[in-house]
């Protein structure tokens, strides 16, 4: 089912949790809501679910204005960060819960429910686990059961609020791949909240970046990564270097350096240039940025050189390949630096 949000606002004393949110989600899409803590992600999910009433605006499920409908009438599936499984119920009973608690008129018969539960146990790859209790499962297994429970009612939309947030990093990566595959099988319209940019970029068809109750940018993972609409998005989406400078006559001039880069379609005046560590390279030419090596950090997948440049407040990071042949410059040396790719934002 497609989903349309129109001018949604929700205020709490002293804070706009949602500030004029407009968003459309197509049927079958997997969309990630990405933003720092407090940016309004959970509030937006709760408004869509019908757990919270907005101060203004509307929520449409397909052509139906659902703004006044209850959670149950909207028939949404919801998964929370902290496993909300019923501890005294077996896995199969947990999954069946939404169907069993329907009014008699719309409740499937016992055999149908049992079939559906078995199907879902297969889908979450826990076919033998129906008789277990939640405490007999790992964290990742519990979240898969929570997902099966949400899917059991054949929800109009699936809403996931940081579902893997409490799990360790390795399990999180496995589950995010699994969720992507599951989504390809079910084609369920899904809205997925995360504060982890890697999770959002890897998993989603589209990413919605939120900041202080507003949408900062909506786009494909590729567009968000390559064309961040603001300095905020650039910095939030990955490691970032920032250089202060000025745009004059179509060029960005880095303060305290001969380094000048193209600045087409950017207005004249003070600006900030952002560049990823892997887009900075060592270069000897006259036009390079001179920077002093502060430290060198070896990691499994890269060598990171920390640099300080004249008149630049922020330390720069430049990545070199982690191959055994790489000889990083020694701390204390001054090196030249060029940028392969950059983005400019008004200061
Ligand atoms: P996120 O999920 O992105 O971390 P939330 O949607 O939980 O953010 O919160 C957005 C903002 O609204 C925060 O500033 C939060 O403190 C505030 N907020 C959320 N719920 C309430 C509430 N029930 N009462 C007061 N303030 C709230
Ligand atoms: Mg939240």
Image (cartoon, rainbow, N blue to C red):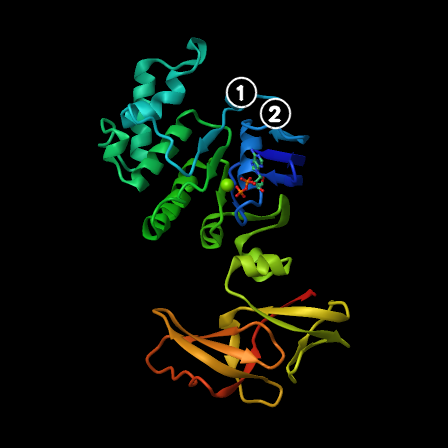
Return the mark for residue 66.
2
For residue 147, side relative to residue 134 (left or right): right
Density class for disc 2 (Cα within 10 Å; few <14, some 14-19, many ≥20) is: some
Residue 61 spot, x, y in % from top left: 59, 29
Density class for disc 1 (Cα within 10 Å; few <14, some 14-19, many ≥20) is: few
Up the image or down, 67 lies above or below 138; here it is: above
Asked where in the image residue 122 lies, by quadrant, the reply is top left
Up the image or down, 172 lies above or below 3; here it is: below
Which residue is nearer to you in this view: 268 or 190? Answer: 268
Tell me what residue is drawn at x 64 percent, y 58 percent.
Answer: 230
Q: According to the image, label 1 marks what residue?
A: 73
Tell me what residue is drawn at x 63 percent, y 27 percent.
Answer: 63
Tell me what residue is drawn at x 41 percent, y 30 percent.
Answer: 150
- State whether label 2 is within 8 Å of ligand 1: no
Give the alpha-carbon distance from disc 2 to disc 1, as whole Å.
9 Å
Which residue is nearer to you in this view: 126 or 18? Answer: 18
């Amino acid at each position: 089912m497609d989903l349309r949000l129109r001018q949604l606002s929700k205020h709490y004393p002293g804070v706009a949790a949602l500030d004029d949110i407009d968003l459309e989600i197509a049927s079958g899409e997997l969309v990630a809501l990405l933003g720092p803590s407090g940016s309004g992600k959970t509030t937006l999910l709760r408004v869509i679910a019908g757990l919270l009433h907005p101060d203004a605006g509307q929520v449409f499920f397909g052509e139906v204005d659902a703004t006044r409908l209850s959670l149950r009438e909207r028939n949404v599936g919801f998964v929370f960060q902290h496993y909300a499984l019923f501890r005294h119920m077996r896995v199969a009973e947990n999954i069946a819960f939404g169907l069993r608690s329907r009014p008699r008129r719309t409740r499937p018969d016992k055999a149908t429910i049992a079939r559906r539960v078995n199907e879902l146990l297969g889908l979450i790859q826990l076919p033998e686990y129906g008789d277990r209790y939640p405490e007999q499962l790992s964290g990742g297994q519990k979240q898969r059961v929570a997902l099966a429970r949400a899917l059991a009612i054949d929800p109009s939309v699936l809403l996931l609020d940081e579902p893997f947030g409490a799990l360790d990093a390795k399990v999180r990566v496995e589950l995010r791949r699994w969720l992507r595959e599951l989504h390809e099988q079910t084609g369920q319209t899904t809205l997925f909240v995360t504060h982890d940019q890697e999770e959002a970029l890897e998993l989603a068809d589209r990413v919605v970046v939120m900041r202080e109750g507003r949408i900062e940018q909506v786009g494909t993972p590729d567009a968000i990564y390559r064309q961040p609409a603001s300095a905020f998005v650039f910095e939030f989406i990955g490691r970032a270097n920032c250089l202060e400078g000025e745009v004059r006559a179509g060029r960005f001039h880095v303060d305290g350096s001969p380094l000048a880069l193209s600045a087409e379609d950017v207005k004249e005046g003070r600006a900030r240039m952002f560049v990823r560590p892997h887009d900075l390279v060592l270069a000897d030419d006259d036009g390079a940025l001179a920077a002093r090596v502060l430290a060198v950090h070896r990691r499994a997948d890269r060598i990171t050189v920390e640099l300080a440049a004249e008149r630049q407040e922020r330390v720069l990071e430049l990545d070199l390949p982690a191959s055994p042949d790489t000889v990083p410059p020694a701390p204390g040396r001054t090196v030249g630096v060029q940028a392969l790719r950059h983005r400019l934002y008004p200061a």
